[in-house]
Image (cartoon, rainbow, N blue to C red):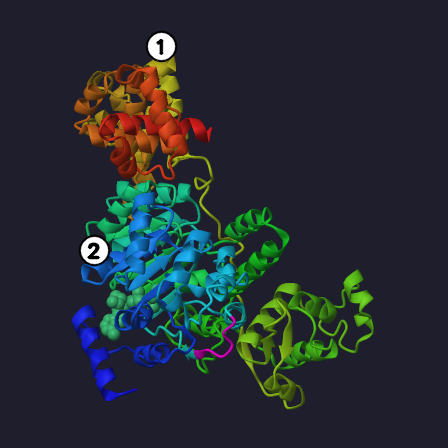
Amino acid sequence: MLTEELSQLKETLKEVFGYGSFRGTQEEIIQSILAGRNTFVIMPTGAGKSLCYQLPAIVMPGAAVVISPLIALMKNQVDQLNAVGINAQFLNSTLSKAEITKVKRDVLNGQVRLLYVAPESLTKEENVELLRKANISFVAVDEAHCISEWGHDFRPEYRKIRGILENLGKHLPIIALTATATPKVQVDIQKNLDMDDAELFKTSFNRQNLYYEVRPKVDAKKQLIKYIKNHKGKSGIIYCLSRKKVEEIAELLNVNDIKALPYHAGLDASVRMANQDAFLNEEVDVVVATIAFGMGIDKPDVRFVIHYDAPKSLEGYYQETGRSGRDGLEGNCVMFYSYNDILKLEKFNKDKPVTERDNAKHLLQEMVAYAESSVCRRRQLLHYFGEQLDHDCGFCDNCLKPREKFEAQDDIVLAVQAVSQTDQRFGVAHLVDVLRGVKNDYVMSYGHDRLKIFGAGAEKDVAYWTSLYRQITVYNFLEKDVDNLGIVRATAKGLHFVDNAYPVTLTKDHDYSNADEESDDDDSDLNNNPSAPRAADEALFELLKALRKKVAKERNLPPYVIFQDPSLEEMATTYPTTKEELAQINGVGAGKVAKFGKPFLELIAKYVAENDIETDSDVLIKSMANKSKTKIFIIQQIDRKINLDEIAESKDLTMTDLIEEIEHICYSGTRLNLDYYIDQMLDEDRQAEVWDYFLTAETDSMKVAVSELGDEYTEEELRLMRIKFLSEVAN
Ligand code: ADP
Ligand code: MG
């Protein structure tokens, strides 16, 4: 490349992006594209992959087509580029007809430098036609691991990309980029995009500033709160597997004075966007999210990423933890692990089609192996991505905490012999059966019961051998077969070891059999049953009930006249010990405090003292009840058909806040009948019109609804109709 061109690239880098120099191999990658070569980029999250196609797109004539899996991600990048004066546009399902026409016109006019498309849009004939006619510089396939069904994020539409490009009648260089490619996925991507000839740029996945830790999921909520409080004022992401869990944990944090917002695909796009912005703008420190959050988020100073639930794969895990410490400073990655979570995930996998199921199971097993192993975490992670670290990292829980070791020389010999005697064609489960002398159909059908090695390791159990196999794979005595899922083969090092064995110490696995979620962590939903906050202290609750019975008897009254159950439960969660605190409890007015309060306060004070409630635990998990109070109040008022204005006023809420609360209540599963209010606002025909709109609209976004119907309806009317619509169609 000419020096002149080079300096021009650097100028553009500075002028458009504001960076003084390229990072890592960015410059070489860009040159490869400019030279018209197929290019394959594998770099960890945060390495700066986007720039590798954005910059050449800017300097080359024609539009670069960027295929990207997430609409949010697309929009994010387009916004950023537009902000620096680059004409970037996207084609996806959120655009109106008129907008699509305009994008196409601009592309054909040659004004557009980058055209982002979702893979679904790419398959549409009209868009294929556009690409045929337009001047295209090259094609970028971002998040290219989506092509592979062996990865964690498979999108079938990604497989159609190659075929479509071939039909455009012109040669287009491709750049594929991903942050997660095991050797198997890597092969798959190149095969599928037909780019075996591609120039490969792969940088190490080692992120030296990240600390990895796995904790047993015992008392996880308490641990979580304590952890965040110890990292006060720092940015963090908490990943949960379900939307419901996200909501629950976000609320738990909020009532414990940690500002946190939820993020998941079930939230309205505008809410999601607002919550993401609040995190980026540091209005909140913590986001609780499903894995929907994070792709394309490049907040540089995320200090911790916590997996509250076990992740589904190591690929996903590595990408998610990779969002911490992008600025090169401290990043803490903590996973809470329990076998119960794994069972849940397995159950979930059962509903998938067969091929997907096998793969999901395999990915999950790798994750389990990682979590349970006592081997250096970084070594395992890097090994998973095809890199060998030849020393322990000294910066993970397994390196920093003493581990129990054992001498394994003889058993390693047996394990490798089992592999070679069975012709290197089997997976670990089978090898363990052979070693342990199990005469099952599978073993017998291969005649493996006649092998010398059969039964040679019978005195050790399955867990022992499975763990040993995992470890010696990480230590490169064995390797995974890239073409056949689950099969291991002996490496040269392994074969050599059999005849020239030397002492090797391995480490015992962690025992997580006691790790489990706390009992209140079941799947029932708080909001479905607002009268039963689940954080209640059962023992205290029982004592309070007994006291109530006694007091009621003395006064010859039914117990519920004294205090109702929800009030007692709330007492058993918030531990009021003064009259003022007691008066805060739902259902307890000043009158009841005066009449019945004393013995209850005494009981609670005694209980708190005896159980060291405040001193013993660093963290006292406050109940959700306080927070739920407003919700309960709203539900009751709506039942009584109190005017919305009045409800808002008595809780000091704006109308928008109130409607948001109502949305929250309804979307977390509680049925509210809003007909009374809606009927007052809209006649039947108008209701039908809005209903039909939501029924046929492509999105339930309020912004879109307002732009379509805003002239005729107020936002309040549209919002209430949307709640009604969503609650009814969902049930
Ligand atoms: P990836 O797609 O690899 O996860 P991104 O493309 O989102 O990473 O980039 C991560 C961050 O690195 C962004 O904030 C980006 O602006 C920044 N970045 C990229 N290239 C450079 C560079 N040459 N100098 C400084 N910062 C850069
Ligand atoms: Mg990226």
Kind of element beneath mark 2: loop
Looking at numbered disc 2 in the image, what kind of residue is underneath it? Gly
Name the image quarter holding residue 256. Answer: top left
Say which of 515 and 483 sits in front. Answer: 483
Residue at numbered disc 1:
557
Say which of 698 and 249 sits in front. Answer: 698
Please state which of the two labelled residues, at mark 2 or mark 1, is closer to the viewer.
2
Residue 233 is labelled as: 2
Q: Residue furthest top?
A: 556
Whole-percent x and y of residue 453?
Answer: 75, 76
Sequence-first disc among 2 and 1: 2
Name the image quarter holding residue 40. Answer: bottom left
Whole-percent x and y of residue 222?
Answer: 35, 48
Residue 327 is labelled as: none
Whole-percent x and y of residue 710?
Answer: 23, 31
- Main secondary structure found in the magenta portion: loop
Say which of 668 and 410 sits in front. Answer: 668
Q: Which residues are magenta?
A: 194-199
